């Protein structure tokens, strides 16, 4: 499912009075709020859905697959998602 399909699903769920634009604005608001929450608090938990959390990756040694030379990979941050047991159970 891509963003356009998700907007359409939201519009259908909101009913006949909802416009495509209002559904897209609602989706953008939710995604923006999750992004801001992860940046600010490093964790956003949505009960019944899952948790978005900042994951820290330590610096490590890697290898260039083309030349085989060793190289240092810098430490970085990433966002991880852990599904709730309710979501996992519905799959």
Image (spheres, rainbow, N blue to C red):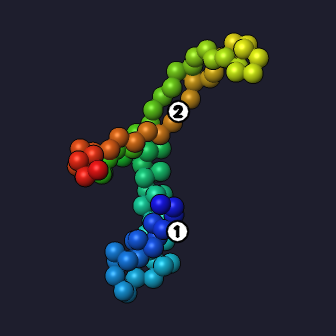
The residue shown at (47%, 44%) is 39
Give the percent coordinates (x, y) of residue 22: 46, 77
Q: Is residue 23 left or right of residue 63?
A: left
Q: Is residue 44 visible?
A: yes
Q: In the image shown, does 60 or 37 lie closer to the viewer?
A: 60
The secondary structure type at the circle numbered 1 is: helix
**Within 10 Å of the Cα at label 1, are there few (<14), some (14-19), or many (20+) other Cα atoms?**
few
25 over 84 or under it: above or below: below
Checking the image for residue 32, the label placed there is none
Q: Is residue 21 left or right of residue 91?
A: right
| Labelled disc at residue 77 | 2
Q: Residues within 10 Å of mark 2 (few under 14, many from 20)?
A: few
Q: Position of residue 66 (x, y in %)?
A: 75, 21
Q: At 41% from the left edge and 76% from the top edge, which residue is drawn?
A: 11
Position in image of residue 75 (x %, y %) = 57, 24
Q: Residue at x 51, y 63 (%)?
A: 3
Quick check: can you spot residue 45?
no
Callout in the foreground (2, 1): 1
Q: Which residue is mark 1?
A: 4
Q: Would you place residue 68 above or below residue 87 in this image?
A: above
At numbered mark 2, what does the secondary structure look like: helix, strand or loop? strand
């Amino acid at each position: 499912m891509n963003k356009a399909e998700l907007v359409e699903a939201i519009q259908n769920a909101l009913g006949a009075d909802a416009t495509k634009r209002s559904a897209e604005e609602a989706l953008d608001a939710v995604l923006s709020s999750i992004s801001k929450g992860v940046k600010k608090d490093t964790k956003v938990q949505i009960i019944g859905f899952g948790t978005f959390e900042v994951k820290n990756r330590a610096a490590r040694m890697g290898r260039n697959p083309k030349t085989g030379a060793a190289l240092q990979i810098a430490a970085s941050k990433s966002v991880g998602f852990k599904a709730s047991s309710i979501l996992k159970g519905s799959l």
